[in-house]
Image: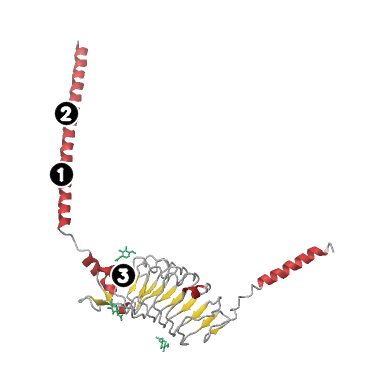
Amino acid sequence: MVFASPLVTQCRIVVLLVLCLRGAPSPAPSAGCPERCVCDEQLVVQCSGQRLSSFPTNLPLVTRQLILSNNHIDELPALQLNYLSDLVYLDCSNNSIRDISESTFGNLRKLVYLDLSYNMFLKIEDQAFGPLSSLVMLRLTDNPLLSEIHPTAFAENVALQVLDLSRNNLTTLNVTSLITLPALRSLGFSGNPWNCVCEIEDLCLWMQIDTFRFQDEGQTVCEGPPGLQDLRLAELGLHLRMQCHPSFGHQDYLFFAAIGFVIFAAGTVLAWLTGVVMVLFERYVKREDGQLDLEKEGVKEEGGR
Ligand SMILES: *[C@@H]1O[C@H](CO)[C@@H](O)[C@H](O)[C@H]1NC(C)=O
Ligand SMILES: *[C@@H]1O[C@H](CO)[C@@H](O)[C@H](O)[C@H]1NC(C)=O
Ligand SMILES: *[C@@H]1O[C@H](CO)[C@@H](O)[C@H](O)[C@H]1NC(C)=O
C-alpha cells in the first residue's frame, strides 16, 4: 500500500490533466431564450424582424451575439443590456431607438461590433460610447434626424477602426478627438448636408490625408453655403484654410512696423557701440606701441654711451 500511493497520486494528476485539456465545458446558454427569438449553441440570439416593440427579456446571460435588427424597439435599457457582459456583437439596426447615454453600454467591454443604423437618434451625447474600449466597428448610418454629435463622443474608443456616419443629418462635425484615435482607418461621412464653413475646416483637411479611407468620398459634398454646393469636402481644405485664416490686418502691419523700428534702432545702437569700442581699442594699441618705442629708444641711448 505504501508503495502504491505515489502511483495513485500520479493517476489522479493524469485524470485531472486530461479533464483540464478537454477544456472547461463551454457555458451553455441558460435555459431561457426570449420569445420569438432563436438561440443557438454558438451563443447567438437571433431576433431579427420579429415585430418586437421592446428589448427582449429572458436573454441568456452568456450571449455573445445579439441580433435585434428590423424591429420597433424604441429604447435600449441599460440595466438589461449590461447583464450581457460577454456580448461581442450587437446589431440594433432598423429600430426606433431615440437616444443612448453613458450608462447604456456601461458594462460591454468586450463589444467589438455595434450597429445602430436606421434609427431615430436626434443627437449623440458626450461619452455615449465611452465604456466600449474594444469596439472596432461602429455603424451609425441612416438616422435622418441625427444632426449633432458631441466632440468627444468617440474619444475613449481607442480600438475603433471603422466609423460610418453616412446619410445622417449632420451639417458639422468636430473631428478634433477623432483624428487622434490610434486605430481608426476607415470613415464614412457621405450623404450628410454638410455646411462648408470654417467649423469643418479640419474635417475637410483630414479628408485629404491618404492614409485614411473615406467611403464614398465622391458623395461627401457640401449642401451650403451658396456657391460651394455639391463641391467635395476633400477639395475644400485649402480653400477654407485661406478663407478662415485671412492674411494680415491693420494691427499686424502696425506690429511689423514697430518690430522693424525696434530692430533698426537696436542695429544703430550696436553699430555705434562697436565703433566706439574699436576707436578706444586703436588708441590703446597705439599708446602701448608708443611706450614700447620709448623704452627701446631708452635702451639704445644707454647702450650708446
Ligand atoms: C426595416 O424593418 C422593416 C420591418 O420592421 C422592414 O420592412 C424594412 O424593409 C427594413 N428596412 C431596412 C432598410 O432594412
Ligand atoms: C436636419 O437638421 C436641420 C437643422 O440642422 C433641421 O432644420 C432639419 O429639419 C433636419 N432634418 C430632419 C429630417 O430632421
Ligand atoms: C472642437 O472641440 C474641442 C473640444 O473637444 C474644442 O477645443 C475645439 O475648439 C472645437 N473645434 C471647433 C472647430 O469647434
Mark 1 or 3, closer to the camera? 3
The colouring scheme, among rainbow, by chain, secondary structure or one colour, is secondary structure
Camera-nearest residue between 31 and 296 = 31
Label 2 to label 3, Cα distance in Å? Answer: 69 Å
Residue 157 point in image, percent of width and height = 43, 68
Question: Residue at the top extreme?
Answer: 305
Q: Point out the tag, 1 or 2, that comes first from the N-terminus.
A: 1
Q: CA distance from mark 1 to mark 3?
A: 46 Å
* Crowd tier of the residue under label 1, counting other residues whose Cα lies within 10 Å: few below 14, some 14–19, many 20 or above: few
- Image quadrant assignment for residue 102: bottom left
Helix, strand or loop status at disc 3: helix
Task: State which quarter of the image contains the N terminus.
Answer: bottom right
Quarter of the picture containing the C terminus is top left
Q: Which mark is residue 265?
A: 1
Can you say whether 238 is above or below 272 in the image? below
Q: Which mark identifies residue 108? A: none
Query: Is residue 282 shown above or below 163?
Result: above
Provide the residue designation for mark 3.
Answer: 203
In this figure, what is the number of numbered marks?
3
* Dot placed on the residue nearer the N-terminal end, 1 or 3: 3
Q: Which marked residue is nearer to the observer: mark 1 or mark 2? A: 1
Residue 299's place in the image compared with 184, above or below, is: above
